[in-house]
Image (cartoon, grey):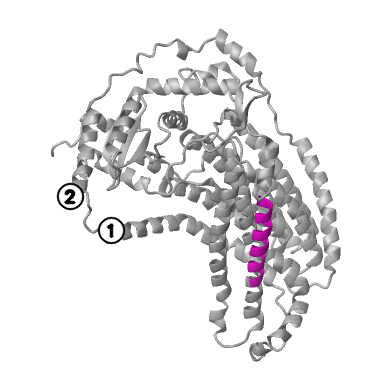
């Protein structure tokens, strides 16, 4: 078979560092591709061009080893000045501190975005890396994950492992209390309260230890501003001594004020919707006794999906608009602000039913039903004679979140992306049975190119969803586990498979995450504290008011609230104790001026090396390949014009 493209570029296609997707449908696509190629080659990169789809072209980018070392040394020098690296010997990429694949990808990506800011860069996974990670059934090693996927994804798996291992404590405690103390035990509740407080603090200590070990602690100091950030002035950074874009904190706070009405109004509307659906479910399941009851009991589930999904879509758009208004300086600040708003929705959807059952249905259901049933005379012939309520309702709901919800969530994460991708592919084939452009790959490249094309259509990975699931699960443990003390055991088993399922999802169903620098899980640390604090009140009030799952309680709810208030004060004291015995290590390195003076007196060996290796001759074959690729699309455009 005749060779379509230059053999010299086949190695670049198979071992590229990243891929740039360029639209082939615009009139200026030819000029855009040539400019991209020229700029990349001038910067020292090796490039190749191949057709991607009917509307896009792949530009493969490979950085020679000398160039990678230069970029890494430059990045590590900046890290040393900003305090991320404290040992000068760690700056030399030719020394004992070797370059990880994720570090090489990150510095290449950052350099490329600096060259072509107007070009949209898309990641595509390497088939070899996918197979290696997704087939691994051994316990996830967070340091290996960091080497391939960067610190952000690695921190998630580190948190998952830490949470999984620490769940052994409440699981063992739950088994003991379930068989010897029963449900709603104050002793069990106090143990869970202690565990929640110490877990949140111990994770902060572990997180700081990892960030220091990975030399990413304080990476915010070197994070670049997003393009949308509009500074009012420049201010000298207290650590680095350099001028940075500055936007007053007080003005940022003023710009967050419009968020308050959004949270209040949307929270009120969502609470009304959820409460209405809850009331409808109680009516249909426990009061209604007419025809089609079996089908009508499914109505609340349908109503829940029909109401919450559109509501969330509208709420998410509004939250994004308000976050844009806040003029956040970095991508991390923007993500935290946006995630904080979105988490309110997830919190209410996850916990409202349990709160309504525990604090409204249990104490007041008979009075509420007696009051409103008289207003439903038109349906009176379909009512039961007397409403007794269901004492097991709270436990049944909690067991649903322990079992069915976790299983559905796990299956959804693994199967839904694959199903959606298959449906999308089927629809695409139905719409165009005959492709408008016939792409002919070389035999040596066909398998790799097909893999890249499939991966470029995968959705981008977002760690928010994975973190949200674990934090919500943590909330069930620290707020409602006295209802069923074996709850931590269920979550422990679930998380054994969840860790492996998440890795399979990332490596098979998502685009490869960009290896970015993150030294903390950020917002989720605050959520752990919030849920633990709320748990101090729910644990104690539930244990006081409910003594059994077999009958309604006759105790006073106001007294339960007073006990909850007392427990909240105890939580504050216990947290102060936990912070004092598990302090977070605040490592302070040398100031910026000292570090800069050291570099001036001891230049890196990388700076002494000649850069002759990097300045290679321009490869003209890539432009010949580009002309061949563009010619395929040009012929198709000519046919359309005829």
Instruction: Check disc 1: other Cα within 10 Å, few if <14, some if 14-19, many if 20+.
Output: few
Q: Nearer the viewer, residue 253 or 541?
A: 253
Instruction: Check disc 2: other Cα within 10 Å, few if <14, some if 14-19, many if 20+.
Output: few
The percent coordinates of residue 353 (x first, y second) are 66, 66
State the extent of the magenta-drawn residues as a range: 259-276
Task: Point out the image quarter for the N terminus.
Answer: top left
Q: Which residue is mark 2?
A: 639
The alpha-carbon separation of the residues under discs 1 and 2 comes to 21 Å
Q: Quadrant of residue 240?
A: top right
Type of secondary structure dominating the magenta stretch: helix
Q: Quadrant of residue 79?
A: top right
Which of pointers 1 and 2 lies earlier in the amino acid sequence? 1
Q: Nearer the viewer, residue 8 or 312?
A: 312
Please tell me whether mark 2 sits on a helix, a strand or a loop.
helix
Closer to us: mark 1 or mark 2?
A: 2
When the figure is inspected, residue 433 is found, relative to residue 60, above or below; the finding is: below
Q: Which residue is mark 1?
A: 429
């Amino acid at each position: 078979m005749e060779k379509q493209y230059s053999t010299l570029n086949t190695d670049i296609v198979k071992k590229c560092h990243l891929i740039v997707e360029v639209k082939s449908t615009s009139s200026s696509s030819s000029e855009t591709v040539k400019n991209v190629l020229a700029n990349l080659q001038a910067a020292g990169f090796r490039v190749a061009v191949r057709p991607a789809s009917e509307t896009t072209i792949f530009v493969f980018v490979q950085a020679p080893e000398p160039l990678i070392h230069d970029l890494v040394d430059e990045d590590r020098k900046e890290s040393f000045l900003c305090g991320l690296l404290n040992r000068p010997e760690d700056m030399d990429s030719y020394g004992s501190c070797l370059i990880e694949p994720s570090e090489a990808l990150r510095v290449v990506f950052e350099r490329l975005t600096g060259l072509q800011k107007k070009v949209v860069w898309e990641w595509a996974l390497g088939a070899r890396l996918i197979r290696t990670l997704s087939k691994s059934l051994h316990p996830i090693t967070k340091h290996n994950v960091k080497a391939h996927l960067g610190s952000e994804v690695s921190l998630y798996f580190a948190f998952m492992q830490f949470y999984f291992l620490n769940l052994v404590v409440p699981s063992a405690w739950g088994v003991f209390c379930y068989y010897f103390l029963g449900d709603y035990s104050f002793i069990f509740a106090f143990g869970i309260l202690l565990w929640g407080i110490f877990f949140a603090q111990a994770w902060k200590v572990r997180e700081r230890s990892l960030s220091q070990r990975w030399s990413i602690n304080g990476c915010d100091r070197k994070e670049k501003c997003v393009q949308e950030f509009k500074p009012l002035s420049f201010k000298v950074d207290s650590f680095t001594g350099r001028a940075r874009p500055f936007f007053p904190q007080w003005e940022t706070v003023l710009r967050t004020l419009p968020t308050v009405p959004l949270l209040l109004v949307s929270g009120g509307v969502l609470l009304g919707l959820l409460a209405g659906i809850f009331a409808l479910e109680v009516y249909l399941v426990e009061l209604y006794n007419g025809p089609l009851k079996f089908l009508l009991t499914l109505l609340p589930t349908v109503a829940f999906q029909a109401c919450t999904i559109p509501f969330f879509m509208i709420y998410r758009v509004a939250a994004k608009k308000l976050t844009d208004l806040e003029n956040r300086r970095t991508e991390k600040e923007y993500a935290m602000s946006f995630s904080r708003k979105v988490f309110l929705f997830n919190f209410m959807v996850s916990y409202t039913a349990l709160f309504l059952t525990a604090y409204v249905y249990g104490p007041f259901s008979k009075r509420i039903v007696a009051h409103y049933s008289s207003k439903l005379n038109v349906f009176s012939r379909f009512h039961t004679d007397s409403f007794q309520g269901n004492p097991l309702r709270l436990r049944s709901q909690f067991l649903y979140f322990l079992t069915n919800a976790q299983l559905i969530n796990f299956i959804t994460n693994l199967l839904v992306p694959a199903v959606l991708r298959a449906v999308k592919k089927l629809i695409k084939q139905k719409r165009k049975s005959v492709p408008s452009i016939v792409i002919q790959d070389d035999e040596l490249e066909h398998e790799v190119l097909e893999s890249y094309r499939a991966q470029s259509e995968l959705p981008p990975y977002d760690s928010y969803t994975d973190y949200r699931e674990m934090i919500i699960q943590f909330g069930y443990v620290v707020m409602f586990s006295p209802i069923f003390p074996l709850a931590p055991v269920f979550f422990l088993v679930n998380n054994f498979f969840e860790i492996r399922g998440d890795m399979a999802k990332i490596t098979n169903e998502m685009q490869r995450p960009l290896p970015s620098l993150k030294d903390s899980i950020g917002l989720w640390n605050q959520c752990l504290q919030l849920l633990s604090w709320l748990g101090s009140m729910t644990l104690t009030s539930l244990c006081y008011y409910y003594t059994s799952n077999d009958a309604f309680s006759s105790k006073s709810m106001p007294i339960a609230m007073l006990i909850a208030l007392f427990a909240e004060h105890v939580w504050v004291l216990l947290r102060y104790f936990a912070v004092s015995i598990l302090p977070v290590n605040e490592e302070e390195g040398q100031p910026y001026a000292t570090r800069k003076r050291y570099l001036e007196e001891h230049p890196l060996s990388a700076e002494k090396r000649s850069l002759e290796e990097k300045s290679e001759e321009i490869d003209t074959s890539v432009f010949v390949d580009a002309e061949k690729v563009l010619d395929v699309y040009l012929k198709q455009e000519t046919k359309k014009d005829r």
